[in-house]
Amino acid sequence: MTDSNHPALHPDRLFPAEPATRAIARRLYAEVRTLPIISPHGHTDPRWFAVNEPFRDPASLLLSPDHYITRMLYSQGVQLDELGVEPNGERRAPPAPELIWRTFAAHYPLFRGTPTRLWLDWVLAEVFGADCPLTSANADRTYERICAQLATPAFRPRALFERFGIEVLTTTESPLDSLEYHTAIRASGWPGRVISAYRPDPVIDPETPGFVTNLERLGALTGIDPFSWRGYLAAHQARRAFFASSGATSTDHGHPTARTEDLGERDAEALFERVVRSARRGDLSSADAETFRAQMLTEMARMSLEDGLVMQIHPGAWRNHNTPLFGRFGANIGADIPTRTDYVAALRPLLNRFGNESTLTIIVFTLDESSYSRELAPLAGHYPALRLGPAWWFHDSPEGLLRFREQTTETAGFYNTVGFNDDTRAFFSIPARHDVARRIDCTFLAKLVAEHRLPEDEALLVVRDLAYRLPKQAYRL
């Protein structure tokens, strides 16, 4: 999808200020500007593409699913229920969507200088041709314009998927999910490729509420007893095979830390039995929970070596840090906070077991930027199985994307990384996020060319690889 001539979208945004280097960045960007989007990991709703119904309204489409928006507004005193986030167990009518939109417009200046502002301006200007920036003065006019367009066939989910130039879009589902919407998409005859990723956290993390109930459901789905160690592992293998048969090419693991263990079978079995017993009684120790999660990362790597699913590890987030808010609204409201994360010691048991396997791909992400040059780049620059995921979550900003390249390229190079993924629930922001990532890669490469560290013809190859070939290759798409 190409940029319009909207004055809010300067054609040289994010490019270097120095004229000669900026000219190089422009030439590089021309090579990737219209390449198809590979979105190999994210959290959009597959139902959108299965039923292909019109989106309801601008507020529920653009605001409620976007943690970057809700957390910023909440930090400035806007209550979540004013934004349409429904409290658990409270029956009350949410504000009218046009009122939510007015609240958002009144607070739009809060996003100055943030990546959210870049993405939102792009969506308003490029997708809807609306006034930009959003203000209280143009809020109602913008809302009505978006509503009118959402009612047209050109703004249905499948049409936008094609308009955005998305080649493949990966969602993320639990092993307990039926994948009914993915099945419906494939059966519909629509050629858009929407696949899932296997996210087993609800049946791996014994601190998950309802863990034992989740195991019972896993057993019912697979017809395998999940309360014996061998049966539990076999149930995972069965669900992984089901996901793969539905098109999945990857797994995803959102653990609090990157710790791994490689216990012998008897010790692993004893740990599993102890974890299940204590989870039933409600006296699970945090030490056992962490050790079990660590062992299961190694078990998942073993299964990936066998079935070919790419393994992603997303550690280092303190989930639901705001306890009162979690109690009222639940998870995924913007209250997760990055933590310091160890990788060298944490990953060693897994890497000693499987890190030298060139047919295995483990993609590791971080929210701890201090680990880029000290730990992650040296690890990925050595172990054949390991690849670095891009700047993620709090760091997928222009500055964060550039820091990632600056701190990892000297040790890991470009080809031990996997390009960009958007990892978002906000469907309309996907092309905006990929455009920002492509521009930042062009800026980084342009500097190498200008300093005579890389010929421009090679930079052209690299920028195309980063935007398109590497994510397809890494995720086996």
Image (cartoon, rainbow, N blue to C red):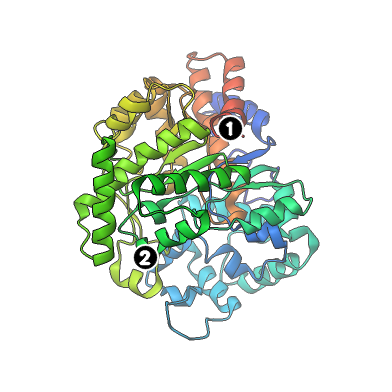
Is the C terminus in the top left, top right, bottom left or bottom right quadrant? top right
Is the residue under label 1 in contact with that under label 2 (CB below 8 Å)?
A: no
Which comes before the other along the chain, label 2 or label 1? 2
Identify the element where label 1 is drawn. Answer: loop
Residue 129 seen in this snapshot: no
| Residue sitting nearer the eye, 472 or 59 | 472
Tell me what residue is drawn at x 57 percent, y 20 percent.
459
Q: Which residue is mark 1?
A: 476
Residue at the (46%, 21%) spot, across then down:
358
- Residue 231: where, in percent of width, then height? 40, 48
The x, y position of residue 340, in whole percent, is 26, 44
Q: Residue extending furthest bottom?
A: 92
Up-down relation of residue 37 to residue 89 (above or below): above
Q: Position of 349 compared to 123: left or right?
A: left
Which quadrant would the N terminus be assigned to in this image? top right
Residue 210 tag number: 2
Residue type for callout 2:
Gly
Q: Which is in the foreground here, disc 2 or disc 1?
A: 2
